[in-house]
Amino acid sequence: MILKNREEDIKAAVKDFEKLLREQMDRADKMGSEKSSGKASDSATVIGLIDGDGIGPIIMKEARKLLEIMLSDEINAGKVILRDIKGLTIGNRKAQGKSVPDDVLDEIKSCDVLLKGPTETPKGGTMESANVTLRRELDLYANVRPVAVPELGIDWTFFRENTEGEYVLGSRGIKIGEDLTMDFKVITEAGTERIARAAFDFAKNNNKERVAIVTKANIMKKTDGMFSEVCNRVAAEYEGIKAEDWYVDIMAANLVNPSIRSGFQVFLLPNLYGDIITDEAAEIQGGVGTGGSANIGDRYAMFEAIHGTAPRMIEDDLQDYVNPMSIFKACEMMLRHLGMAEKADKLRSALNKALSSECPYKVTGFPEGSTCAELTGYVFSQLA
Ligand code: IPM
Ligand code: MG
């Protein structure tokens, strides 16, 4: 590379970096000062339903039926409205050149909570994942993912930071010249404090005694270093709850170590480690097709499956064999969030039965297993 280009490339990169730095400082300032209140009014609760891509519309169709059954009284009384939100499809997003088109975002913001099928995220390019955009736009900072395998003594709840870390600038890395690339990881004090409080509040309210703080602070010294420090500081306010620092690599190993894993209760992780570790945990539960995920903020909440759009299932014509459990789990979390604990408990017991040996239907994703319709029918029969 000749020197002139190198100097120009550096100058351009520094300019880009300055812009990012200013934006991130503004974001951190706002986070510390703004405290949004809950639901706008006490009128009807609007549940926005977003189909998504790939297997999304298939599982969302079953989820809609489930909500119609479980919320029929509330819907008839006008207390709950199910609102279909169209346009969050990869076709429309590409056509409009926006990860979440403006009109779709406006509609989404007119709801109180959302139930969302998986949306396709193009690899490379500059289009941000719709999930990342929505988590940021709705300020859904806590990604809560429960994983339970009662027969193995596993009852885990993951609190994944959901608005910063490796994700916040994931589509805005810098390419310098032709041969050097850089991405950025951003962790702020305010961003860490609010997820830490969410995790420790949960631990306190649910009689949990241990919170595992998962980082790689020996390597990512600044960002993970701050994450661990702030989490430990918050922990000191919660008497009787033990905070433990773990590195993410050994935690990945621990989750498949039967002699240690059942002792874990609550996990607190930065964004990317949370993404990876919760897929591993869901696999232990019975596959990512069984994992529900809640994205919670102070104003909005969005519930979804833990997994992606499963394009291979569509390509291989396996759509009849998709697993609806993940989105049903998301429905359970949504009902609980809406203060409908009794309904959530009822759904939880139906879902536990569907996952137990009592249930004759096992969805494997392949024709030798049961179909989505069979398992859905079984879950609905358990609700009757
Ligand atoms: C998840 C997903 C998303 C993520 C993708 C779809 C952007 O894997 O919710 O875990 O990486 O957060
Ligand atoms: Mg993931």
Image (spheres, helix red, strand yellow):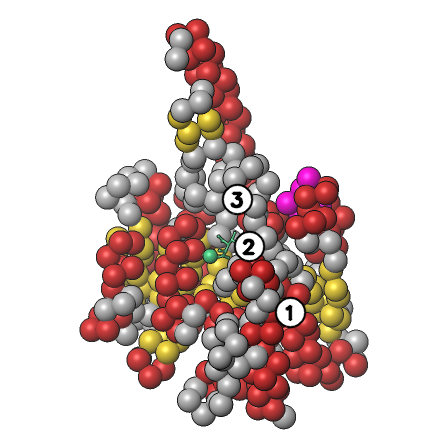
Res 207 seen here = no
Labels 2, 3: front one: 3
Label 3 sits on residue: 123
Q: Residue at the left extreme?
A: 259
Question: Label 1 crowding class (10 Å Cα cut-off): few <14, some 14-19, many 20+?
Answer: some
* Between discs 1 and 3, the one toward the N terminus: 1
Secondary structure mostly seen in the magenta stretch: loop
Q: Quick one: SS at disc 1? A: helix
Per the model, the C-alpha gap separating discs 2 and 3 is 23 Å
Quarter of the figure with residue 380? bottom right
Res 256 seen here = yes
- Using residue 273 as the reference point, say whether residue 312 is left or right of it: right
Per the model, the C-alpha gap separating discs 1 and 2 is 25 Å
Magenta span covers which residues?
Answer: 97-101
- Using residue 59 as the reference point, say whether residue 78 is left or right of it: right
**Residue 309, relative to residue 343: is it above or below?**
above
* Between discs 2 and 3, the one toward the N terminus: 3
User: Does label 1 point to a residue whose CB lies under 8 Å from ligand 1?
Assistant: no
Q: Residue at the top extreme?
A: 4
Labels 1, 2: front one: 1
**Residue 308, relative to residue 70: is it above or below?**
above
Q: Which amino acid type corresponds to the residue marked 2 in the rendered image?
A: Leu
In the image, which disc is placed on residue 185?
none
Q: Residue at x 47, y 33 (%)?
A: 173
Label 1 sits on residue: 58
Label 2 sits on residue: 140
Quadrant occupied by the N terminus: top left
